[in-house]
Image (tube, rainbow, N blue to C red):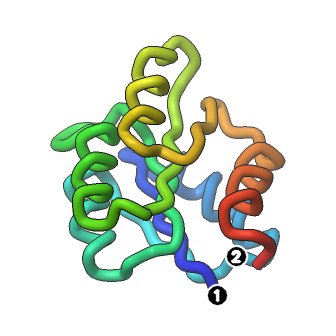
Amino acid sequence: MAKILCVDDAAFMRKVVKDTLSKNGYTDLYEAVDGADAVDKYGEINPDLVIMDITMPNMDGLEALKAIRAKNPAANVVMCSAMGQEAMVIEAITAGAKDFIVKPFKPDRILKTVTSILGNP
């Protein structure tokens, strides 16, 4: 079973992602509250996929992406951004993100992105 780490400083956003994934058969789900927490949890659980917000306190998603990719250059990381953050999305893709999802989340977009990277659960 694929392990997925959901990273967002907003608990509601983590819940939306986790609920969407769990309803579609992905059950090995973890959470992190900011970039620093994500880097720590990545080292602990070695997830198959990280879905991470860009704008967070302590360490933003771009810094966390770079730290995770330094640990594992093959890491699957999908970034999340609000409308109007196109420059950050481009920077994230350049830094190795596999894809990005625009907020507010559409469940079918989350699922399509996850299955394109991991396959079906």
**The N terminus: image quadrant:** bottom right
Give the amino acid at mark 1: Met
Can see residue 106?
A: yes
Q: Mark 1 highlights which residue?
A: 1
**Which quadrant of the structure image shows residue 41?**
bottom left
Judged from the image, the secondary structure of the residue bearing numbered disc 2 is: loop
Q: How many marks?
A: 2
Left or right: residue 20 versus residue 71 is right
Q: Mark 1 and mark 2 in contact (Cβ < 8 Å)?
A: yes
- Where residue 49 sits in the image (x, y, percent)? 52, 65
Q: Residue furthest bottom?
A: 1
Q: Is residue 89 above or below residue 16?
A: above
Q: Nearer the viewer, residue 34 or 87?
A: 87
Left or right: residue 16 versus residue 51 is right
Q: Mark 2 highlights which residue?
A: 26
Q: Nearer the viewer, residue 79 or 17?
A: 79
Foreground mark, 2 or 1, reads 1
**Residue for point 50% across, 60% down:** 76
